Image (cartoon, rainbow, N blue to C red):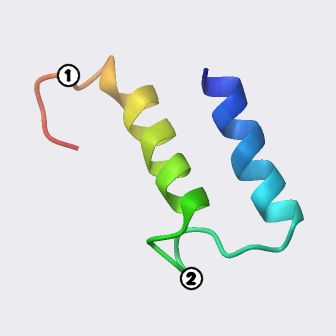
Amino acid sequence: TVIKKLNAVSEAQFDDKPIGAYDPNSEAAKQFMDLAKELLGFAVETEAI
């Protein structure tokens, strides 16, 4: 769910792991991008994100 994904990203930040800008291939970055796509998907389903 969205909340679980947000929690995973928050935990990664609290654990002082790099997010996105530092390591675009990190698990947290992937989760963040999946979350962003999920949140944006309903509004822009026909557009590539």
Figure check: 42 above or below 19:
above
Residue at the spot 45% in from the left edge and 73% down from the top edge: 24
Say which amino acid is labelled 2. Tyr
Q: Position of residue 35 (x, y in %)?
A: 50, 37
Q: Which of the pair 2/43 is nearer the observer?
A: 2
Left or right: where does residue 2 sit relative to residue 38?
right
The secondary element bearing badge 1 is classed as: loop
How far apart are labels 1 and 2 at the CA level?
28 Å
Image quarter in which the C terminus is found? top left
Return the residue at label 1.
Answer: 45
The residue that appears at 14% across and 40% down in the rendered structure is 48
Secondary structure, mark 2, is: loop
The numbered mark, 1 or 2, whose residue comes first in the sequence reads 2
Kindly identify which numbered label has been placed on residue 22.
2
Instruction: Name the residue located 79 percent from the left edge and 50 percent from the top edge.
Output: 10
Q: Which image quadrant is residue 6 in?
A: top right
